[in-house]
Image (cartoon, grey):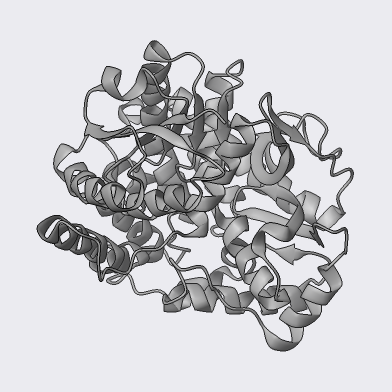
């Protein structure tokens, strides 16, 4: 089995250590020769980098080399896989995104509604620059992108690089949901085979099967309706907000029992409820800044100072392991089934072909081979088409600099659905993002 060379783009991310633990946990499925971190923020990356040196020394001594760098050529030239996790504007801009929406009494969330629009607009330009830089030094490496908001980013990438067949956009949320399904069903996560359709953060499981062929869908629905379901993945299990989110899955299934919903549908189905529970002075971004970010970098400092990971609570999470398993299926032509984002091209027959849909696919060395979904019911079709219109208009606006496209986009978005409010939010978003979005000035 060929050992892989991996570059993590966004090496300063608070998720990087978890990703490294996932690579360690999956070393038999995805053996590596070399790992490189790349980030434009050298100081932030250095904390993760120095801690990872200790981690690999203890838990991956067979690795041939590890380094972290801000040099593009050094980072990109020899990689087989790029794991991409960037956040243009950092958590500080995420906080502004959430606050702007909440001040207009709309959902303040990083990927949904007005916050997702702002974050998506900032992400597009940096993603294009990054892909151009990668391809300057490396024509064939797989780019696995899980930069949020994945729906908008995937739409933009597909327009800019329609012929690059080695870019795959992925979201870990369906996997995090399936971990909870596996716990509820008392089975192994990797034995579950999903059937899924929709857009990123806007979809439904129509079936959950066991690898042995058993259909577990109705059994799972019954468990959720009568017992509820909890967040169990290591990264979110102790987060009250995520527990509340998973609790809402019971409500969503009660209100529409046809399919098992993605957790993010709560923001579109119950926007007033979502706004009412938020505090504009203590947004999710602020909670991450004071919580996970602080915790992760304090842990890095302890590991560096001690020269050891002994006594530290380090664990792999589904976010990382799902990405690694996807990479393994691509690298070794395994054909395993994962949920990824691809051009529709008839997969969902009654949705336009150029939609970037999130569906279950077999992953081979030639890329994703999506399974047909067929026709979907009127309700889900109408929901998807409205959200798709929003996403496409946001990307149209990035290319054209047309403010009216943004107003129209938010008017379609179920978290706003009000033209005067959309106009006011767009004005505030563009004012806050002047340095990132010069095309609108």
Determine the image quadrant of residue 357. Answer: top right
Q: Along the line of sight, which residue is nearer the eye, 407 or 364?
A: 364
Residue furthest left in the image = 305
Position of residue 63 relative to residue 301, above or below, is: above
State the quadrant of the N terminus.
Answer: top right
Q: Position of residue 62 (x, y in %)?
A: 36, 40
x 75%, y 81%: residue? 223
Drawn side of residue 165 relative to residue 4, left or right: right
Quick one: 380 or 74, which is closer to the camera? 74
Quarter of the picture holding the C terminus? top left
Which residue is at a point 30% across and 28% down the rendered structure image? 438
User: Can you give x and y, in whole percent of width and height, for residue 79 in the image?
Assistant: 41, 24
Q: Which residue appears at 53% of the width and 20% of the height?
A: 160
User: Which residue is pictured at 40% across the width and 54% down the height?
Assistant: 21
**Could you tell me if residue 396 is visible in this image?**
no
Q: How many marks?
A: 0
For the question of whether residue 56 can be seen, the reply is yes
Nearer-the-camera pick, 290 or 323: 323
On the picture, is 298 further left or further right than 189? left
Q: Quadrant of residue 293?
A: bottom left
Which residue is outermost to the front?
62
Q: Relative to 183, is 11 above or below?
A: above
Residue 107: where, in percent of width, then height?
Answer: 48, 63
- Residue 259 place in picture, x, y as percent: 79, 64
């Amino acid at each position: 089995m060929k050992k892989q060379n991996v570059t993590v783009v966004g090496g300063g991310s608070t998720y990087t250590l978890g990703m490294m633990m996932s690579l360690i946990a999956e070393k038999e499925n995805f053996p590596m020769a070399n790992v490189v971190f790349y980030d434009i923020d050298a100081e932030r990356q250095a904390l993760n980098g120095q801690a990872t040196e200790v981690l690999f020394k203890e838990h991956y001594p067979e690795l041939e080399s590890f380094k972290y760098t801000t040099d593009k050529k050094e980072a990109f030239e020899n990689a087989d896989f790029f794991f991409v996790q960037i956040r243009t504007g950092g958590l500080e801009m995420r906080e502004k995104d959430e606050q702007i929406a909440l001040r207009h009494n709309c959902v303040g969330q990083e990927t949904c509604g007005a916050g997702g629009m702002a974050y998506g607009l900032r992400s597009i330009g940096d993603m294009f620059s990054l892909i151009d830089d990668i391809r300057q030094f490396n024509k064939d490496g797989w780019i696995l992108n899980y930069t949020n908001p994945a729906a908008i980013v995937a739409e933009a990438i597909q327009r800019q690089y329609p012929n690059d067949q080695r870019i795959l956009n992925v979201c870990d949320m369906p996997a995090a949901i399936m971990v909870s399904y596996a716990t509820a069903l008392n089975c192994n996560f990797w034995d579950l085979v999903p059937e899924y359709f929709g857009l990123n953060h806007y979809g439904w499981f129509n079936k959950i099967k066991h690898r042995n062929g058993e259909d577990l869908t109705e059994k799972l629905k019954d468990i959720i309706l009568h017992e509820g379901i909890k967040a169990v993945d290591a990264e979110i299990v102790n987060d009250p907000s995520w527990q509340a989110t998973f609790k809402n899955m019971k409500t969503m299934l009660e209100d529409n029992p046809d399919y098992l919903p993605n957790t993010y549908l709560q923001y579109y189905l119950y926007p007033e409820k979502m706004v009412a529970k938020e505090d504009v002075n203590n947004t999710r971004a602020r909670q991450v800044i004071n919580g996970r970010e602080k915790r992760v970098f304090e842990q890095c400092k302890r590991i560096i100072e001690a020269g050891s990971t002994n006594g530290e609570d380090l664990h792999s999470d589904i976010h990382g392991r799902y990405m690694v398993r996807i990479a393994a299926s691509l690298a070794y032509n395994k054909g395993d089934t994962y949920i990824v984002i691809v051009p529709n091209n008839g997969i969902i027959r009654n949705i336009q072909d150029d939609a970037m849909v999130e569906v279950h696919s077999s992953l081979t060395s030639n890329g994703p081979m999506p399974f047909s979904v067929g026709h979907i019911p009127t309700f889900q079709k109408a929901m998807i088409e409205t959200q798709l219109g929003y996403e496409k208009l946001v990307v149209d606006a990035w290319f054209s600099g047309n403010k009216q496209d943004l107003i129209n986009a938010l008017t379609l978005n179920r978290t706003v659905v009000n033209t005067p409010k959309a106009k006011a939010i767009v004005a505030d978003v563009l004012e806050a993002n002047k340095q990132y979005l010069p095309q609108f000035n």
